Amino acid sequence: MDFSIQELRAFARSSDWDNSPQSDQDKELPAPPIFPACPEGAKLISLPSPDDCKTLGKSFLADIRDRKSNRAYRSQPLTLNELSFLLYCTQGYKCMRPQSTVAALRSVPSAGARHPIDTYLAVLNVAGLEPGLYRYQPLEHQLWMIRPATPALADEVVGACHNQLFAGKSAVTFFWAVDMYRCEWRYTTHAHKLVLLDAGHVCQNLYLACEEIGGGCCAIAAYDQKKSDELFGLNGDNNFVVYVAPVGKV
């Protein structure tokens, strides 16, 4: 479906909260799960504590000043400790929000603490971790291995990123996908703007966390929607990719 520039601008500035449709939360319908579930028999890999990662110990101001997009990566792998650190900094679980069973406090802000963004990974070069496709399980700080890598995985990643070759030369490429109803349940027609804001929070944390491990990343908005969704078996309706970022040592 095509939209005019004026229609898209209207979406971007939408803030008519007083006339929002009644939400499923208001109707007292059950909340969708706040965390993604794994299929029965899923292969789960426990991650080391993010506290075990040896960082550069730079100042926060130095991280801010040094932050930039990096599209060239060394062949040096990331360590599992470093990947754990990046995942916790971008989506780490802290606790449930007090007096709530439907909202979680994590390492990034999210509208209503609903956290509709899930982290999927194409792992190409992480020491101690088999190459393949994974999803981060923030509650348990684990990885679910969706499938091992095929010889064509790097090419699949490049294809999903509109043939931007640097995406296939990363140590790991982050694909952030949305579970729309997790946000729609509370925010109805506002959810579709809010999830994009949430994705921005997550990606900025990745940029800053990369600075602490001598790494770099480059956010990609020009990805192939169909190929990105198919790579991780997403249905393209309620669940679909909204942002991508390759990461490697620089």
Image (cartoon, helix red, strand yellow):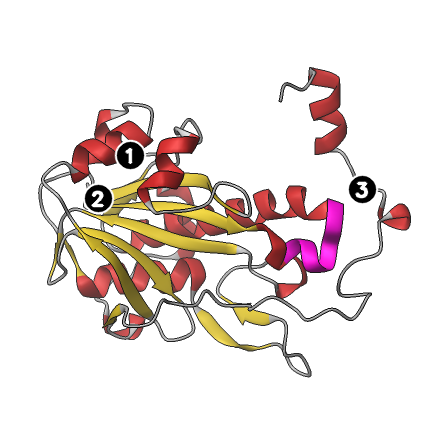
- Residue type, mark 3 in image: Ser
According to the image, label 2 marks what residue? 248
Q: Whole-percent x and y of residue 28? A: 78, 71
Residue 186 covered by magenta stretch? yes
Residue under the point 35% across and 52% down? 120
Residue at 34 percent across and 47 percent down: it is: 232
Query: Is label 3 in contact with label 2 (beta carbons under 8 Å)?
Result: no
Would you say 46 lies left or right of 32 here?
Answer: left
Amino acid type, callout 2: Gly
Residues drawn in magenta: 183-189
Which residue is identified by label 1? Answer: 70
The CA distance from mark 3 to mark 1 is 35 Å
Label 1: element kind: loop
Between discs 3 and 1, the one toward the N terminus: 3
The structure residue drawn at horizontal position 36% and vertical position 39%, both measured from the top left corner, is 230
Camera-nearest residue between 171 and 228: 228
Q: Principal SS element in the magenta part?
A: helix
Tell me if label 2 and label 1 are in contact, CB under 8 Å: yes
Residue linked to disc 3: 15
